Image (cartoon, coloured by chain):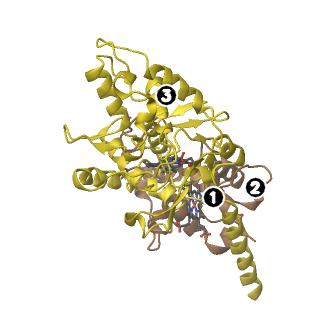
Amino acid sequence: MIRGMLGLLVGCSLAGAALAETAPADMKVGENGEVAASLTGAPGNAAEGRKVFSSRSAGNCVACHAVSEMAHDVQFHGDVGPSLDGVADRWNEAELRGIVTNAKKIFEGTVMPAFYKTTGYVRPGDAFTTKPAAEPLPPLLTAQQIEDVVAYLMTLKE
Amino acid sequence: MSQKYALIGLVALAAVAGAAKADPVDDTLVINDEIEMITVAPAPDHLKDVFDVVRSGWLYRETETRDMQRDDFENPAMLHVEAAAAVWSTPEGTEGKSCASCHNDPESMAGVRPTMPKVNPNNGELWALEQYVNACRTERMGAEAWKWDSQDMRDMTALISSVSRGLPMNVAIDGPAAPFWEKGKEIYYTRYGQLELSCANCHEDNNGRYIRADHLSQGQTNGFPVYRFRTTNLVSMHNRFKGCIRDTRGEPFEIGSPEFVALELYVASRGQGLSVEGPAVRQ
């Protein structure tokens, strides 16, 4: 009985850790690059994701992608990548999570950076300082930011 | 269903229209109503499978920026050229000599910039213009070498470029230059930094597009050193390379390093046939 309870407690705290987040190396990636499970164990916040998407110091996705919905309040949308209008009609949530975490698993050789990856770089720097940085690097976005961006992308329906 | 396809068609059309807006302009550059510039040239043989033509970065800039480069009185870089012209004839160092003592007028340097960088026959190394300038200073004038990215050096390379304006870029890439060219090419196609982007990702695959507010050009070097409004000063070619690798969240090579000189040769060879524009004007 006591043992059983202890077991339960340990179980709970493990679940707590898992809830906290999945590290890049522990992500379960499907055959087509999709990532089914939330990295935080919880749904993201689309409003926060919108900020990550448009902010130069976070995802800066808008450097390469235009989104009509933000044309009125975010300046200078790039066109290196496709417009993401209606992207949630084209991809499901697991696929979108796969694209944002590591687009190279879905589009071979793409210029889109992998936002949830820590190793395998050539001459990585410490952000934009020009100073060298040792791997593993912090991923470009945190698990929470990835989930928030995915939640935002899921709102882009036509 | 058919409605959905129609919609997708519309989106595709909009994207094409957007891309067309970002294309380089169709414009001609004549400096001081006198020097005719080649801003579009047939791609050199080694680039034929990539581009039909190569284009000067000038064609990717806004009207006001382009206009400033048409006239030396408008081009802010010409103040730096003037400063260097004064230095040109000022003796310095233990030998009591100036550049003019050996080379007469700066115009005697016409034809030098289009061939840089080139292998120095004395030591077999690939040398950029900066290194030849410093060899004169240290060996022939008994003066101190200038730092690669110093104001004096940027001014002097601007002066030396300016007297070659209009001449087509024409670097040697065979013979002793070949191994350096290969090394530069390898660097050009390596995806650096945490963003994993190569020079080619931006300047070959995506020139004509916008990355945020920046209109991507082919990343040609014929305009260097360039005057940039952003710094209100001349920017050296290696400093530009450094900035581009920094923007990949990468660790750039050192300014003046053999890696950057090799890259300089390779990038110059991608612009063979484009007129020397240095000092050009950029945003």
**Residue B155: which numbered mark, if any?**
3
Which chain is mark 3 on?
B
**Residue type (three-letter) at the residue carrying disc 2:** Met
Chain name for mark 1? B
Inspect the image, locate mark 1, and give the three-letter code of the amino acid beneath it. Answer: Pro
Q: Which residue is mark 1?
A: B24
Q: Classify 10 Å Cα crowding around label 3: few (below 14), some (14-19), many (20 and above).
A: many
Q: Quadrant of residue A67?
A: bottom right
Front: mark 2 or 3: 3
Disc marking residue A70: 2
On the image, which quarter does residue A134 sit in? top left
Residue lying at the far right of the rendered structure: A72
Residue at 41% in and 34% down? B108
Q: Are marks 2 and 1 on the same chain?
A: no
Same chain? Circles 2 and 3: no
Q: Quadrant of the N terminus of chain B?
A: bottom right
Do pointers 3 and 1 mark residues of a single chain?
A: yes
Tint of chain A = brown
Number of dots carrying numbers: 3
Residue in the foreground of this view, choosing between B54 and A1: B54
Could you say which chain is coloured yellow in the image? B
